[in-house]
Image: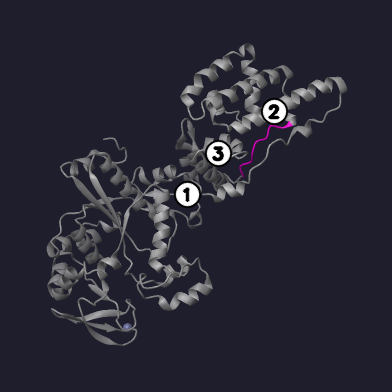
């Protein structure tokens, strides 16, 4: 199989199927940190693997936006801003689809955080189709399931007690009170073929309401079972705690789905839990390239993942983000030159630049600084070596301009140019690498290809000026090499970081 993450069994399972539907669920009450990403990235990896095998794959993300907002979610959502907490605390207990966003009057609470979450997933190349359960309820898609549950309550409870020892659901359905709009303190007192009798402990009102006007949500396991049946779901990711074989959430939902909702078999995609110290929260996403972060969550997806600072640095040192470069070597060897001029950088290189600067600060505890070849470094380079370096730079600039995006075409003439230096090859290359802060061993043609052309041009004119000054110095004996330190125009690095 082409995908290295999933074994053959996943491909075998669906080999006779034209289309496969993979689902995942979320409650978009707040954005949160990176911990919950694994579920969606593992599901997406399976989506990609099956698409790669030629299947049509639907990837559905259900937002349980009929869930009531609770106080803990409110605090996290507004970043503990006490004035917003005071303003929105009275709404706790209402469905998040019925509360306006604290940050945008035109959006509901749920839509605001859905947008943020989908943007986050999209930045990680994960693009599910979002389905709001509130829309499914309001369009009547759940009505047959709600009727089935409310009219056969006793049979269902008996089935659950007989089949899943120890499982006694508190409620099968949570109605929204038609008087006060809260969902957290309501219950169905009774139901008949046409109406449902609702009681609300918040406002103390009781009301009879028809199925068409009824608003509310099924108990989560029933809700899950209903949408599996509604959308013919084949796969959904779950952690171990949901997969306990006797009365875990998955097996209960599967039993309800098959027995009462006419649904089929769903394959649980088991993924390991993620643990991470709180202080790492929201520092990983802006610091790691999307491919590196994805890889960390997705590879060995069955094993539990313990994320800490050391782990992040190890991931950065392993992940190849450019040919022959891992992320750490990009940060140490390329960023100092890229910082001087980012105008020529490709979108991939710009992502590496902004993430690399943040990574260096967060996890290496140092700022990336541009490397300027200065007068002092030039002073310690023998004149004949500088002269040979100068002609090499002139030639490399011509080659770079001739093959702007074609490394393969650039290699051969570059190697030939370097070889022509003969005995001076070694000292020229050594001093050049020292000048640009690239002393570690990457192939010469590779680093000469990755340095911005403007950087090479500036370096060339600097060496040229120095050689001219040196010539005059031999005559007049007064020149200050430090005067040569500023021909570079530094770009605003804050600005680059903000672009991402
Ligand atoms: Zn009420």
Q: Where residue 12 is drawn, which disc sits there?
A: none
Q: Quadrant of residue 397?
A: top right
Give left or right: position of 418 versus 185: right
Image quadrant of ligand 1 equals bottom left
As measured in the structure, the alpha-carbon distance from the residue carrying label 2 to the one carrying label 1 is: 45 Å
Mark 1 lies on a secondary structure that is: loop
Mark whose residue sits in front, 3 or 1: 3
- Residue 291 inside the magenta-drawn segment: no
Residue annotated with mark 1: 308
Residue annotated with mark 2: 461
Residue annotated with mark 3: 331
**Predominant secondary structure in magenta?**
loop
- The region drawn magenta spans 367-374
Mark 2 lies on a secondary structure that is: helix
Mark 3 lies on a secondary structure that is: helix
For marks 3 and 2, the one nearer the N-term is 3
Mark 3 sits near ligand 1, with its Cβ under 8 Å away? no
């Amino acid at each position: 199989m082409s995908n290295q993450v999933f074994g053959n069994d996943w491909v075998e399972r669906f080999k006779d199927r034209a289309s496969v539907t993979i689902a995942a669920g979320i409650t978009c009450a707040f954005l949160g940190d990176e911990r919950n990403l694994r579920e969606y990235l593992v599901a997406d990896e399976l989506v990609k693997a099956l698409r790669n095998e030629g299947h049509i794959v639907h990837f559905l993300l259900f937002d349980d936006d009929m869930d009531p907002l609770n106080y803990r979610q409110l605090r996290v959502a507004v970043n503990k801003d006490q004035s917003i907490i005071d303003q929105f605390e009275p709404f706790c207990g209402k469905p998040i689809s019925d509360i306006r966003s604290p940050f945008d009057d035109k959006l509901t609470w749920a839509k605001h955080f859905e947008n943020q979450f989908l943007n986050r997933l999209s930045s990680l190349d994960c693009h599910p189709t979002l389905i709001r359960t509130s829309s499914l309820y309001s369009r009547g898609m759940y009505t047959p399931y709600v009727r089935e549950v409310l009219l056969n309550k006793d049979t269902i409870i008996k089935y659950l007690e007989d089949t899943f020892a120890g499982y006694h659901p508190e409620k099968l359905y949570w109605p929204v009170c038609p008087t006060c709009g809260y969902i957290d303190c309501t219950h169905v007192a009774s139901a008949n073929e046409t109406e449902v009798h609702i009681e609300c402990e918040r406002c103390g009102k009781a009301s009879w309401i028809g199925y068409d006007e009824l608003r509310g949500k099924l108990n989560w396991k029933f809700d899950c079972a209903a949408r599996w049946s509604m959308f013919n779901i084949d796969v959904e990711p779950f952690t171990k705690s949901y997969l306990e074989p006797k009365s875990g959430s998955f097996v209960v939902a599967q039993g309800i789905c098959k027995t009462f909702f006419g649904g089929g078999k769903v394959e649980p995609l088991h993924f390991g839990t993620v643990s991470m110290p709180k202080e790492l929260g929201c520092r990983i996403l802006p610091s790691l390239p999307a491919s590196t972060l994805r890889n960390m969550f997705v590879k060995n997806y069955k094993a539990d993942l313990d994320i800490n600072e050391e782990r992040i640095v190890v991931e950065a040192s392993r992940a190849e983000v450019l040919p022959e470069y891992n992320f750490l070597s990009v940060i140490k060897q390329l960023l100092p030159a890229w910082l001087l001029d980012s105008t020529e950088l490709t979108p991939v290189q710009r992502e590496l630049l902004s993430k690399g600067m943040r990574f260096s600060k967060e996890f290496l505890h140092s700022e990336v600084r541009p490397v300027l070849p200065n007068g002092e470094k030039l002073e310690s380079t023998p004149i004949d070596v500088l002269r040979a370096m100068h002609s090499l730079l002139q030639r490399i600039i011509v080659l770079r301009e001739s093959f702007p995006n074609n490394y393969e075409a650039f290699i051969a003439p570059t190697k030939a140019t370097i070889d022509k230096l003969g005995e001076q090859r070694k000292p020229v290359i050594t001093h050049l690498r020292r000048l640009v802060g690239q002393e570690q061993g990457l192939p010469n043609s590779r680093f000469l290809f990755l340095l911005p052309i403007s950087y090479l041009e500036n370096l060339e004119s600097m060496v040229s000026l120095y050689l001219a000054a040196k010539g005059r110095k031999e005559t007049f004996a007064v020149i200050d090499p430090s005067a040569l330190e500023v021909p570079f125009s530094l770009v605003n690095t804050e600005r680059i970081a903000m672009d991402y």
